C-alpha cells in the first residue's frame, strides 16, 4: 500500500527555486502551491491556505525569504492552528537564512529532508 504524498505550500524567493525543491521532495511530499516573494502578502497567504484543495499540511518557507517574512508566516500558522479541530495541525518548516550558502545545494536538501522527517515523522 503506498502512502499519499503530504501536501505543502512553499514560500520562496522565486518560483523556480520552490518548484525545484518541491519536486525533489517526492514521493513523500508534493507542493500544492507556491508563493514567491513578488506575490507574497499576508492576504495572499491567508487566501491560499483557506482555498487550496487539498489543504496543505505544512508551510515550507525558504532560506531566501527574509527573517521578517519568516516570522510573519510562522505567526499566521500559529494563529490558524488555534482555529483547527483537535488533532489537526498545520506544520511550519523554515529553512534558516543562509543555509544554502553554508551547506551548499546538496547540504540544503539534506537539512530539509531531516527537518521534514522530524516534523512529519517520516523516513526517507
Image (cartoon, helix red, strand yellow):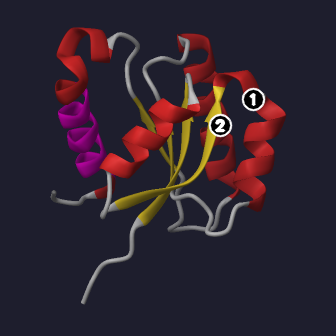
Q: Is residue 83 above or below residue 77?
A: below
Q: Position of residue 13 (x, y in %)?
A: 55, 22
Q: Are marks 1 and 2 in contact (CB under 8 Å)?
A: yes
Instruction: Return the residue at label 2.
Output: 35
Q: Residues within 10 Å of mark 2 (few under 14, many from 20)?
A: many
Q: Quadrant of residue 12?
A: top right
**Placement of 45 over or under 71, stated as above or below:** below
> At which x and y percent is residue 53?
67, 68
The residues colored magenta run 108-119
- In terms of secondary structure, where does tag 1 sit? helix
Q: How many marks?
A: 2
Using the numbered discs, state the Cα–Cα distance from disc 1 to disc 2 in whole angstroms.
Answer: 6 Å
Residue 61 can be seen in this image:
no
Residue closer to the observer: 109 or 78: 109
Q: What is the residue that sits farthest to the bottom in this orientation? A: 1
Q: Which residue appears at 24% of the width and 50% of the height?
A: 117
Q: Residue 86: within the magenta?
A: no
Can you name the residue that lies furthest to the front here? 16
Residue 62 rendering spot, x and y as whole percentages = 46, 27
Q: Nearer the viewer, residue 25 or 70?
A: 25
* Secondary structure of residue under mark 2: strand
Q: Is residue 5 left or right of residue 68?
A: left
**Residue at 51% from the left image edge and 33% from the top image edge:** 16
The residue that disc 1 covers is: 39
Image position, residue 23 (x, y; %): 38, 50
For the point 46% across and 31% down, which residue is it?
17
Where is the C terminus found, in terms of image quarters?
bottom left
Quadrant for residue 74, please give it: top right
Q: Is residue 19 above or below residue 97?
A: below
Q: Residue at x 37, y 19 (%)?
A: 96
Q: Is residue 89 above or below residue 61?
A: below
Amino acid at each position: 500500500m503506498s502512502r499519499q504524498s503530504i501536501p505543502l505550500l512553499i514560500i520562496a524567493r522565486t518560483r523556480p527555486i520552490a518548484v525545484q525543491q518541491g519536486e525533489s521532495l517526492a514521493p513523500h511530499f508534493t507542493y500544492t502551491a507556491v508563493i514567491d516573494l513578488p506575490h507574497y502578502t499576508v492576504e495572499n497567504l491567508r487566501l491560499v491556505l483557506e482555498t487550496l484543495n487539498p489543504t496543505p499540511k505544512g508551510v515550507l518557507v525558504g532560506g531566501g525569504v527574509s527573517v521578517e517574512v519568516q516570522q510573519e508566516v510562522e505567526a499566521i500558522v500559529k494563529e490558524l492552528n488555534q482555529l483547527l479541530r483537535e488533532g489537526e495541525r498545520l506544520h511550519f518548516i523554515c529553512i534558516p537564512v543562509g543555509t544554502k550558502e553554508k551547506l551548499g545545494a546538496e547540504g540544503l536538501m539534506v537539512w530539509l529532508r531531516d527537518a521534514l522527517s522530524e516534523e512529519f515523522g517520516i523516513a526517507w
